[in-house]
Amino acid sequence: MFMLDHKKIISTAMIASAIFFGTAHAGEQAIDGGAIYKVKDGMYTSYAVNTQDKKDFKYGKVPSKTEIAAWDIDVMPDGTGLPEGKGSVERGDELYEVKCGMCHGDFGSGGQGSRSTYPTLSVGSASTETLTNQRNVPDADGPKRAIGTYWPQASTLFWYIQSGMPFPHPKSLSNDDTYALVAYILSINEIEIDGETLDDEYVLDREKFLKIKMPNVDGFIPNIDGPEGPANVKKFLNDPKNYGNGTRCMKDCIDPKVNIVRIKVEINAFEPPMSVERTMKEEKVTGKVHPGQKLYEASCSVCHATDAMGAPNLGNKDAWASVLEKGIDKVYANGINGINAMPPKGGAIDLTEAQFKSAVDYMIKNSK
């Protein structure tokens, strides 16, 4: 499914390395079965190459061990980088409701309405709803890529949650909270660990985490993991049967029996209309623009543009009237310091207090 992308990425990297360093031996085999030639007289075969010395970097400095460690936060499938900690499914359920559900929907069902772009985390039993099974029993919606049906390793789940979630306040979860959320997400995907069902009382820790086997762990070809990864890729790509019939075709290559689906209803109502014009039309500004409008659009609208997030949405008079009952100073303070599921300044910590108050004033002014 992904072999052509892998081929492009890996073979390009191999050839680029040969050109960059000029050390490859003539005829050395590339990972896709092609040949790598030595750069000679400023030429790589028929292509001119910049032969200036690029080995020594002229800018920056060598990072310290501490600086490298600060960025080295990934969690590998073998447990490298996985911290100690523990968390129950029940605790994960509570955290999910407060920090995740407003975007990813109840039980990981996906965002709704204006939040529909947020991904679905579960489509039911991961074991029975794998992509392979979905293709064998096609329906109008087609296969669904969710964590349980698609992801080959649970380590990515832990790493991504702890380093990038919740939006817009990443890196705010403890190790225990992350374990709890991983346990909950695995439970709604009906994934078992070492034959054990993940009920509310189930507690996930590092030892149990290393026993997780995702249903789609063998669903990717070729296998690029581990020290044998490059050899596996080379072997796979050297066999044309894996991505074609082994015979080159230059014309009339589509079997006439193939059912080609044509577009029956064209979409013409584009806003702005489709054009080859590469410049954006200047927006006409009518009237005075509130200084907090752009701040709101850039930093606040993701939660306050709709009531789906649980926050008072722009234009909702009743919701904002209720908020303002505590007084404007209290509203400012709660927003700046954070309250309930809202992080300090809504996660836009780069805003000054004056800028944040201006965005709040804009929302209040447009909700009366």
Image (cartoon, grey):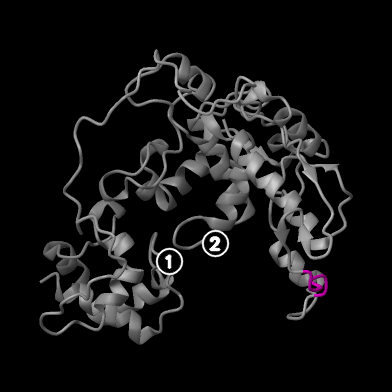
**Mark 2 neighbour density, 10 Å: few (under 14) some (14–19) many (20 or more):** some
Q: Earlier in the sequence, mark 1 or mark 2?
A: 2
Q: Quadrant of residue 368?
A: bottom left
Q: Quadrant of residue 162?
A: bottom right
- Looking at the image, which is closer to me, 232 or 220? 232
Whether residue 200 is visible here, answered yes or no, is no
The residue sitting at 47% across, 41% down in the picture is 93
Callout 1–callout 2 Cβ contact below 8 Å = yes
The quarter of the rendered structure image containing the N terminus is top right
Residue on which disc 2 sits = 172
The residue sitting at 11% across, 80% down in the picture is 286
Going by the image, does 176 lie left or right of 123? right
Counting every numbered tag in the picture gives: 2
- Looking at the image, which is closer to me, 33 or 319? 33
Residue on which disc 1 sits = 343
Question: Type of residue at label 1?
Answer: Pro
Question: Type of residue at label 2?
Answer: Ser
Q: In 3D space, how far apart are the residues under numbered discs 1 and 2 (Cα atoms)?
A: 10 Å
- Local SS, label 1: loop
Residue 47: x percent and y percent? 70, 58
Type of secondary structure dominating the magenta stretch: loop
Magenta stretch in the rendered image? 51-56
Residue 126: x percent and y percent? 52, 25
Task: Say if 366 sits above or below 23 in the image.
Answer: below
**Mark 1 neighbour density, 10 Å: few (under 14) some (14–19) many (20 or more):** many
- Residue 257, numbered label: none
